[in-house]
Amino acid sequence: MSEVTYLEAIREALFEEMDRDENVFCLGEDIGAYGGAFKVTEGLMAKYGEERVIDTPISEAAIIGAAAGAAHMGMRPVCEMQFIDFISTGYDMLTNYVATARYRSMLPCPMVVRGPSGGYVRGGPFHSQNPEAAFLHTPGLKIVYPATASDAKGLLKSAIRDEDCVLYFEHKYLYRRIKEQMPDGDHLTPIGKARIAREGKDVSIITYAATVWKALEAAEQLEKEDGLSVEVIDLRTILPMDDEAIIATVKKTNRVLIVHEDTRTGGVAGEITARINENAFEWLDAPVLRVTAADVPLPYSPPLEDYVLPQTSDIVLGLRKLAAY
Amino acid sequence: MSEVTYLEAIREALFEEMDRDENVFCLGEDIGAYGGAFKVTEGLMAKYGEERVIDTPISEAAIIGAAAGAAHMGMRPVCEMQFIDFISTGYDMLTNYVATARYRSMLPCPMVVRGPSGGYVRGGPFHSQNPEAAFLHTPGLKIVYPATASDAKGLLKSAIRDEDCVLYFEHKYLYRRIKEQMPDGDHLTPIGKARIAREGKDVSIITYAATVWKALEAAEQLEKEDGLSVEVIDLRTILPMDDEAIIATVKKTNRVLIVHEDTRTGGVAGEITARINENAFEWLDAPVLRVTAADVPLPYSPPLEDYVLPQTSDIVLGLRKLAAY
Amino acid sequence: MARSSTAASRLANARPDSLRSAGDGSLSREQKLELYYYMRLTRSLEERLVNLYRQTKVVGGLFRSLGQEADAEGSAYALDRSKGDVLSPLIRNLGSMLVQGAKPNEIIKQYMAKGDSPTRGRELNIHYGDLVRGFIGQISHLGDMVPVMAGVTLSFKMRKQDRVGLVYVGDGATSTGAFHEGINFAAVQRCPLVVVVENNGYAYSTPLKKQTAAKQLVDKAIGYGIAGEQADGNDVIATYEATKRAVDRARAGGGVTLVELITYRRKGHAEHDNQSYVPPGEIDRWASENDPIDRYAKRLLSEGEGGGGGFDQSQLAATDKRVLEEIDRATDEAEASPMPDPTDALVGIYADPPAIAPLWFRQGIKSAVDVHERPSSWGTHDV
Amino acid sequence: MARSSTAASRLANARPDSLRSAGDGSLSREQKLELYYYMRLTRSLEERLVNLYRQTKVVGGLFRSLGQEADAEGSAYALDRSKGDVLSPLIRNLGSMLVQGAKPNEIIKQYMAKGDSPTRGRELNIHYGDLVRGFIGQISHLGDMVPVMAGVTLSFKMRKQDRVGLVYVGDGATSTGAFHEGINFAAVQRCPLVVVVENNGYAYSTPLKKQTAAKQLVDKAIGYGIAGEQADGNDVIATYEATKRAVDRARAGGGVTLVELITYRRKGHAEHDNQSYVPPGEIDRWASENDPIDRYAKRLLSEGEGGGGGFDQSQLAATDKRVLEEIDRATDEAEASPMPDPTDALVGIYADPPAIAPLWFRQGIKSAVDVHERPSSWGTHDV
Ligand SMILES: Cc1ncc(C[n+]2csc(CCOP(=O)(O)OP(=O)(O)O)c2C)c(N)n1
Ligand SMILES: Cc1ncc(C[n+]2csc(CCOP(=O)(O)OP(=O)(O)O)c2C)c(N)n1
Ligand SMILES: [Mg+2]
Ligand SMILES: [Mg+2]
């Protein structure tokens, strides 16, 4: 089998799940005839028809709400946000209606909301967002954010089969930049389980999504230049968080750098830091540090965007500081 | 002067600021003729008329968006969310439009969004929320959450005068339960400055809003029963966070318990923990611990709500654990 | 097709008395009496709840539909339960839930926050649902149920099921973005959905003219390219018939209808609201001249045999009695019910995991307030 | 008053050719030529941007208004800049910004992400504003500008200023909750606001019939209880006149008008879009039969002196030449402009503090990518 890109892996997951289960259907803006702004859903309407691949009005709250209603009835809707930045207009629907349906009303709401996320692409403040922290705070939702093509496929398939609502963030920078041979058969990546992207013993990086690749670059550089062995944990699932994997790496290296592309204050790193404090404080030989975006709306001009977003060089500095601690 | 309740303090601030500056106006659902669901704005319309106290349609996004437009033109709008839970439908407008206006477009957006927040009142999942964590993640917004009547007044007056958008969360449990003599004159509480609610030297509690009172109760209990001296920091402003005050108390007691009423995962405590790690790790003699609500939508039945929300007894346990560490 | 009721929708500035009076549909005698039963059950059940509220046995606020019984009951009655039709009520549509099979004991238990209430104490008042019986529980955020019901009915269409959905919104809720997005979505998809706009003149304290500049809410149908119906919401047969036309249209593939039912909210927004904002005399006028149960009873009594009516007072009185007995039993059962077990709060946020672990400071502790007495300064309910 | 244009709004299934043709308003010769100038400037400026885009000098996507110049320019021209009227453009309303005084060099600098562009490289393409000149920068989230402009015009009303606001939305944006909430809010408040719905047949790839079931967008005015106007969006005088009526109504205290301008998007959503979803021949037909500049030029040339027209070809050619020279100068200036200083990214999130401190790992580092070469696997723009 040939290699497929991250984007193609997502598409494969959609085709496979729509084949497998007739209850799966897709809805979103321009996903049908046009195949989506990034062509993720290309070919889907041709194969499954207008009933199962629905071009909707520009109404994110209605897309999410309608998905919830259909999900109650046993359907398995997959919503596309044209850019994930527009999920903000469905914030109420997701956090109040969808996330609570099972708990308050014993109504299952198995659905997926997916969309192109993240920066490094000169998309400006409204086409580059990372919304995971906004939803981390909502019990009842699950959040995944794959970094590799095989996880992109495996997590989407798992998300579609999950009995609850999964927010599936896909990093648009990775869409066509990474390729991988897909595992054989019905490839499912479990939700809630992190992955060791690189084994190491001196310092740990905990990260997810696009910055996994920057972390790996920094790790390599440190191995070459400083002779340090850096472990990289790719969380894959943000909610529920894989405490076991986090604690295991802390116990192994005793030094942790958390890296995320999202802004710093109120980002996911804070939660991880708190969990490490609670569960593995004695194992820490250094403070948990964060490398993140600066606390500003992401500007669009290349020198500004580069300055705001975390770069490999920043991770290198962070690792050196921790190693020297 | 006689004592005024937390609720009356808010009302006083509104009257004083509307008197002071003709650009200040209020808008929201049922705030005019009816005086608001909790009567916070009672008397306002009678004094200032329908033009400056606007009863709006049920449209939180429009309330917030219209406030932004008016704020651009030099007005000073104060929006009421009938319950703060409904701010979720204005999430896009606040995080994307309002918070970025100055940065992306050099357009000031001085406005306040306020509303009854918090639980302990058998309000169920949609009338008890604490939304601060959802907005902590948004550079460009400020967030305050007063615990005392004088801060309720002083922070609202400061918020109305601030050149940026301030989310002002008022705890409905405190509305009529606490009373205080208001400071004389034009009382302003600075935004961005925490308050030492109780001095202590053995353990610190960092908290805000209603749980400040539970923290004080627990502190008293510990002083009596265990002879421990507990410091209580009332953050008052959540964003921007008062790092100085946080670091100062860590350096003083070396043991920190963070308490908030909001759910645990993705709550404000994570961010505080990360900041302590980064800025005062060497001063920690124990892990930073959290006492918070459990990660569930807040149920309404008393035994359930009591179980989910943090209680004084929980804080006592947390303090004892830290002290014994 | 989509404009089939332009005539009705053109009735500018409609007031109850100017609306065309209704026939009797094709209801059987049994059905007519059943409609009366549901209206009476709704009213009496709410009256019982008021008693319980005054005894502080209700946790939280109490919401009434006094004077609006005809619209919720009449419209819900237009659905076909045997076909699996589904509705989504709002706070003043208790009656619609009863029509779909909700039981008084469930309602009382919900209001009392009992552990064996339908939501096990998680949600308040009538916020609950049962898909099997065909009603879905609302959330507080107004308008949100419209997209949800668009999705429910979209699934009917996708599966080629012969089912119809109905969603209630108030006059106030029509201002929400969710209402707009949901009804537009359903209109484009031609979902088998009926949107009932209960125009009771107020949203909390806000009169209609501060909610919209439109002369009548049924006009909104035009902007969505859907059918519109308007009826006297205090005439149960009229609401039944208008809704029935909409239901039939939906079932026949004709898409969405907006049904405006014109009624009046005689009580405050909730029990605590003193209605100071209401012009003097307005409530009394509606109560004395336009009570939906009085009107319906009169009609049932006066109608000739031929029209299927001609009931006598004793038949209605027997129904009233049956209702009270039912409510008595329900109250007894609810009062005897246990409060929830505190740790049940941790169950069922997700299917997987089915329950979350207690936080460390609660490990082994079953009830927060048993182990540590709640300080007197921290009261209980009083929203 | 609110229904003054029911006649126009009743033109069911309006297509450009069926719309009533416009008079010439009361525009002077200078104004007529100025309108031509703005249309030509818009088109030529966008063509220049296409060149720059092909040279990869534009950062990010490029959005065209080809074939829609008449609607943005004609409608914006109906505002009175001397009175302080304010508009809020969308992505296809570059022309409206030029009418309000935006300059080609600003636009090119924005597209090139320059440090001295109006947003200093923070926001892209035409997302910027200037309150002094009377235009407010949009954000990407469709519909959001409607509530914002409701608030801007509310402030006009509160201060009893003689000012009017205008907000553009596309056919697609009418589906958003924000549009609905904003227009309803403004309608109730009788804000001096004109809502121009540019119906260009598509929202990205989505044709109008998948966006709404309404026959025509102007029908939405009825549901909001506001006035509606509809005009041929490719006839600049018609768009001017329809909007002028709305502006006059707003200024006279008559509240909100929804103006539907019917036009056609001849290019894709953005430059990368190949328009595969468009029926064959449709674009060509609009280009050859209904180009707004061609139509307007023909009219200017053919009109008799009495109507204020009767221009000769050389006058138009002189305008075309002037436009190109202006654009050349603007391009040179923009190309010579510096990129932003990286640390400017930390300035101006709040008034207080005016700048935030760099994160610890950036202390003393001026540019992220100077110190550490960007790995080749990490490219630059290609959304
Ligand atoms: C989005 C949202 N905003 C505000 C509220 C608070 N609220 C609850 S009921 C109500 C009035 C509802 O009026 P209407 O829709 O006319 O229904 P009615 O009570 O008259 O049946 C308001 C403002 C809410 N529940 N949801
Ligand atoms: C809330 C929101 N959802 C989705 C998008 C993505 N998007 C950008 S432009 C566009 C189509 C807009 O169509 P229309 O309103 O008709 O304007 P036009 O491009 O035709 O001028 C879409 C879907 C967005 N910007 N905002
Ligand atoms: Mg109402
Ligand atoms: Mg369009």
Image (cartoon, coloured by chain):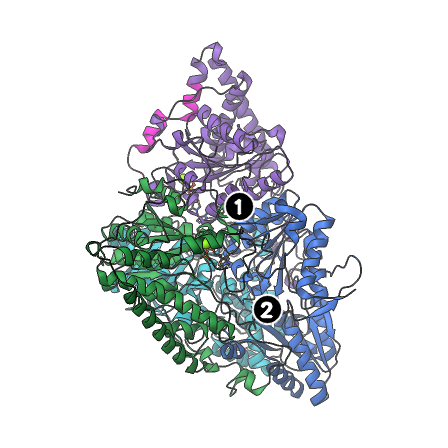
Chain colours: A blue, B cyan, C purple, D green
Q: Quadrant of residue A287?
A: bottom right
Q: Residue D19, how many percent across, how many down? A: 35, 45
Label 2: how many Cα within 10 Å (few below 14, some 14–19, many 20+): many
Q: Nearer the viewer, residue B30 or A145?
A: A145
Q: Residue D291, how many percent across, how many down? A: 40, 56
Q: Which residue is mark 2?
A: A268
Q: Residue furthest left?
A: D306
Q: Quadrant of ligand 3?
A: top left
- Find out whether residue C363 is within the magenta segment: no
How many numbered circles are shown? 2
Left or right position of A291 against A303: right
What whole-number distance in Å separates the C-alpha atoms at marks 2 and 1?
31 Å
Type of the residue with mark 1: Pro
Q: Nearer the viewer, residue D266 or A187?
A: D266
Residue B1: tell me if it is visible.
no
With respect to residue B39, does A7 lie above or below? below
Left or right position of B217 against D136: right
The answer for which chain carries disc 1 is C
Q: Residue B37, how many percent across, how many down? A: 39, 49
Type of the residue with mark 2: Val
Residue D85: tell me if it is visible.
yes
With respect to residue A294, does D256 lie above or below? above
Q: Are marks 2 and 1 on the same chain?
A: no
| Element type where label 1 sits in the image | helix
Q: Residue B64, how many percent across, how many down? A: 40, 58
The answer for which chain carries disc 2 is A
The circle drawn on residue D299 is none
Q: Which residue is mark 1?
A: C147
Dominant secondary structure, magenta: helix
Left or right position of A315 against C18: right
Query: Which residues are the magenta region?
Result: C275-298
With respect to residue D353, does D152 lie above or below? above
